[in-house]
Image (spheres, rainbow, N blue to C red):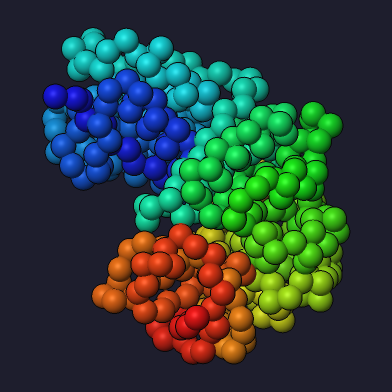
Amino acid sequence: MSSKVAFHTLGCKLNFAETSTIGNQFVENGFKVVDFKGDADVYVINTCTVTENADRECRQIVRKALRTNPNAYIIVTGCYAQLRPEEITKIDGVDAVLGSNEKFNIFSIIPEFSKDTPSCIQVTPTEKLEEFNFAYSSEALGRTRAFFKIQDGCDYKCTFCTIPKARGKSRSTDPDKVISEFKKLVENGYKEIILTGVNVGDYGKHIGENLYNLLLKMLEVDGDFRIRISSIEPNLLTDEIIKLTASEPKMANHFHIPLQSGSSKMLGLMQRRYNALFYRNLINKLNIGIENIGIGVDVIVGFPGENEEDFMETYNFIKELPISYLHVFTYSERPDTPANEMKNVVPIEERKRRNNMLRILSEKKKNEYYNRMIGKNVTVLFEEENHEGNMLGWTSNYVRVQQPYNKDLVNKLSKNKIYGIESNICLSAL
């Protein structure tokens, strides 16, 4: 009987893609992958440094695994393990702590997954993170959408962020190698491939390449698919990429573009690479240039120094922007970041209040956007799962759509028309 392994992933889509790649290592070594809630011989926890209270969360997940199987071998890896290996080593029940590079070499580092090892295996994380490891993962609902890692690390120095320390400098690999992996995903039946990384727009910077040229090469690949960029910095969303998206049906007409604040003063404190006017002009350019464009926005509330006037500037700035939805983050302190030393700290309760205000605004924005889609013809990629006689899918511009179940439409890019909205989901028909 084969040994069993279970995975728990914290954080971003990039982490999920990498967990999937780690999972393949175990499968190739004869393991069966089971649900994290189930009984496993080995539990792998892929951590995130962005998550609030990472230490507490990690302890809770370890305890949960050991309650299921007290004799299980526990591996903790990922960004938190890269930055704070000593803290994780002190968590009762953890058997191995592996950094960002080491997680791709588990079987060469750990000879056997045995609790009999006298002490926790803590591999000193590689400080100079220079390797690039391909990774991809699919959503749970069959081979419909794949998250494909094309870039890692970040050269930016945002004052709130620990990611550059956890993942190293920006790096990517030869476009021919990327295209080779991309073709495999298309051949395996994925109809939507989502390009992920820490700073996707930075692809190719250190090897004389760029994201636009990579997209052109991807679009030359035969097959029925579309490409979505998971997230892209505003200063890296070039006119070339915008024009390509407007003219090429295989490019999803949707961008997720971090803002973080609508106050240029706060953007300066955060050390972002643009101001509010630049961002507004970009969003307006997208709306003029690309039909039915969907735009998602990241924003942080409660950053040190953000007074009520600064917050309301952000609130009103976003209120006037023609966007589709927000991802709202409450600022939380991170060790070894410049922001952690800044004065004028915003009280926790005030951070929560501001977060709630922007979440309500996000729902309004999303509802307005969905209502504007009524009567529009859209291309939908439907998933396999049957929801009480209905099926769900995503449009190119990232609108959630429902229609009566039809197995012939599963994992196909089908032309539909939106005719209404119900429970924050657009209703469509062929």
- Taking the spot 85% from the left edge, 55% from the top edge, the residue there is 240
Against 152, is 372 above or below?
Answer: below
- Taking the spot 49% from the left edge, 89% from the top edge, the residue there is 420
Identify which residue, 307 or 249, lies in the foreground.
249
Residue 158 location in percent, x, y? 70, 46
Identify which residue, 358 or 35, lies in the foreground.
35
Residue 316 location in percent, x, y? 69, 79
- Taking the spot 48% from the left edge, 36% from the top edge, the residue there is 18
Identify which residue, 363 or 230, lies in the foreground.
230
Identify which residue, 264 or 187, lies in the foreground.
187
Against 268, is 56 above or below?
Answer: above
- Left or right of 173? Residue 89 is left
Residue 204 location in percent, x, y? 76, 35
Residue 145 location in percent, x, y? 49, 53
Quadrant assignment, res 285: bottom right
- Taking the spot 35% from the left edge, 74% from the top edge, the residue there is 405
Residue 317 seen in the current view: no
